[in-house]
Amino acid sequence: MRKKILILDDNTDILEILTLLLTEFGYEAKPLSSGERVFEEIKEFQPDLLLMDVMLANMNGLKICKDIKENIHTAMLPVILMSGSHDLANILDKTGSPNDFLAKPFDIDILLSKIEDNIRL
């Protein structure tokens, strides 16, 4: 059974590229362009990992991540945050923080390595 990855980013080009890339590498990837439905999508899609941008239109990826990690139903879902403007490596050990961080632009090998490391949790 293929591992499922929910991708949350408001940039449609990044969503399309990541969906194609992850599908090519054997994952079932589902794009989501707005954080407003993230909990509904998690419930419906039941992903093994959430790959999410920090800067979303009208929403904050850090806040969404904190909400996911503090919710009893989603707390165990691995979350990797992506950002081209924030360095989040220093917050990874705090309550409500993501499992990992990926700086944009990212190297495909690093992306895949981080996904593999976190999907096994």
Image (spheres, grey):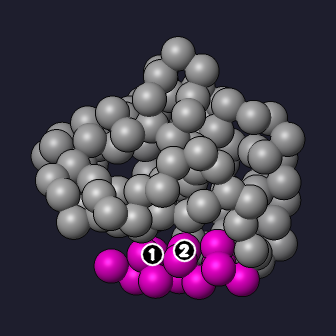
Whether residue 26 is in magenta: the answer is: no
Tell me residue 48's x, y (percent): 45, 64
* Magenta-drawn stretch, dominant element (helix, strand or loop): helix
Tell me residue 24's x, y (percent): 83, 72
Regarding mark 2 in the picture, which secondary structure is present there?
helix
- Left or right of 43? Residue 52 is right
Tell me residue 47's x, y (percent): 48, 56
Magenta span: 109-121
In the image, residue 109 sits, relative to residue 56, either above or below, namely below
Regarding mark 1 in the picture, which secondary structure is present there?
helix
Whether residue 117 is in magenta: the answer is: yes
The N terminus sits in image quarter: bottom right
Q: Which mark is residue 1?
A: none
Q: Which residue is mark 1?
A: 119
- Looking at the image, can residue 43 be seen? no
Labels 1 and 2 touching (C-beta < 8 A): yes
The C terminus sits in image quarter: bottom left
Tell me residue 42's x, y (percent): 43, 42
Residue type at mark 1: give it.
Answer: Ile
Residue at left offset 45%, top offset 75%: 119
Q: Which residue is mark 2?
A: 115
User: Which one is nearer the viewer's eye here, 58 or 29?
Assistant: 58
- Left or right of 40? Residue 33 is right
